[in-house]
Image (cartoon, rainbow, N blue to C red):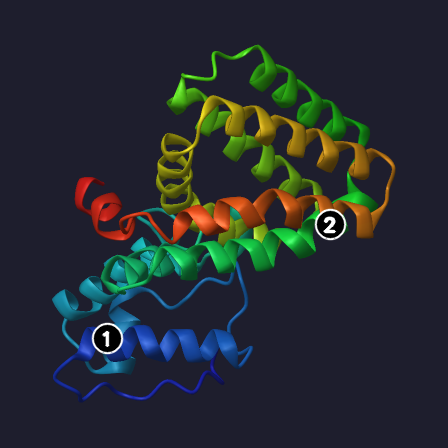
């Protein structure tokens, strides 16, 4: 690591500059995932910072999933595959005044593409999971909003996982808490007949998937989501309530 371009830190917000330094080293491919860094005394000297400042930066980077700090193994760059979500995005959303329609439109744009990929990439195991979820929804008391919402969301998550697109899966995992709250509000606003219609829409999506028909799968998903999209415009924001209680 003798060739790393690390400059001494002279900014008052030193811990933030340390974080920015290592992110830039990763982006520029000077550091690779799993690579061990210098030890604390060496980093303190190179960066020209105190131990408390360095440790504050390391705590933040560990929290964000950038590094792993171990008493025995030292400091190393984290492997992104070990994280199933994007924690920084979660906290950004906590302070953004994002509307329900913005959230739903993001969800739609991802799901409409991923269901097409799922039609090509899903395995028999994926299909069996979707069938099992669909059967549980059919057997469930339609007035049981909480469990209906959980199964509805699980159906969509399973389709996303079936697309085998790790980046989109991680992004949607990050949004899951928000999506669940929004989905629960949608189901509370629907009638039992509407929820039965949801089950029929799921069946249409499932049938398109097992036939490996990408266009039909996207059309079935679009038909399913469009009605819910209209309902979201009348809902109170889920963002403030979600992050206030978590």
Compare residues 222 and 65 and report the one nearer the observer: 222
Compared across the picture, whether 39 is left or right of 136 comes to: left
Q: Residue at x 50, y 44 (%)?
A: 228
Which of the 4 quarters of the picture holds residue 179? top left
Q: Residue at x 21, y 68 (%)?
A: 54
Q: Position of residue 189 (x, y in %)?
A: 37, 34
| Residue indicated by mark 1 | 16
Q: Which residue is drawn at 38% across and 54% down?
A: 233
The dot on residue 174 is none
Q: Position of residue 47 (x, y in %)?
A: 26, 81
Q: How far apart are marks 1 and 2 (CA)?
A: 46 Å
| Residue indicated by mark 2 | 219
Which of the 4 quarters of the picture holds residue 103? bottom left
Q: How crowded is mark 1: few (under 14 residues within 10 Å), some or many (20 or more)?
A: some
Compared across the picture, whether 212 is left or right of 3 comes to: right
CB under 8 Å between discs 1 and 2? no
């Amino acid at each position: 690591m003798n060739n790393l371009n690390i400059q001494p830190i002279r900014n008052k917000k030193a811990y933030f500059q340390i974080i920015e330094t290592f992110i830039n080293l990763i982006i520029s491919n000077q550091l690779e995932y799993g690579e061990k860094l210098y030890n604390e005394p060496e980093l303190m000297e190179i960066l020209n910072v105190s131990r408390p400042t360095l440790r504050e930066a390391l705590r933040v980077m560990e929290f964000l999933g950038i590094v792993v700090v171990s008493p025995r193994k030292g400091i190393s760059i984290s492997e992104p595959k070990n994280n199933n979500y994007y924690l920084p995005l979660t906290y950004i959303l906590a302070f953004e005044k994002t509307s329900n329609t913005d959230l739903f439109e993001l969800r739609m744009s991802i799901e409409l593409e991923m269901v097409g990929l799922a039609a090509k990439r899903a395995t028999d195991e994926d299909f069996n999971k979707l069938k099992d979820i669909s059967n549980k929804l059919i057997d469930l008391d339609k007035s049981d909003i909480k469990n209906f919402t959980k199964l509805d969301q699980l159906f969509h998550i399973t389709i996303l996982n079936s697309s085998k697109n790790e980046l989109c899966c991680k992004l949607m995992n990050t949004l899951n808490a928000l999506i669940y709250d929004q989905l629960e509000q949608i189901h509370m606003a629907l009638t039992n007949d509407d929820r039965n219609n949801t089950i029929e829409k799921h069946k249409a999506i499932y049938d398109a998937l097992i036939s490996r028909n990408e266009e039909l799968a996207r059309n079935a998903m679009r038909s399913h989501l469009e009605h819910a999209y209209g309902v979201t415009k009348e809902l109170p924001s889920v963002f403030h309530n979600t992050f206030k209680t978590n």
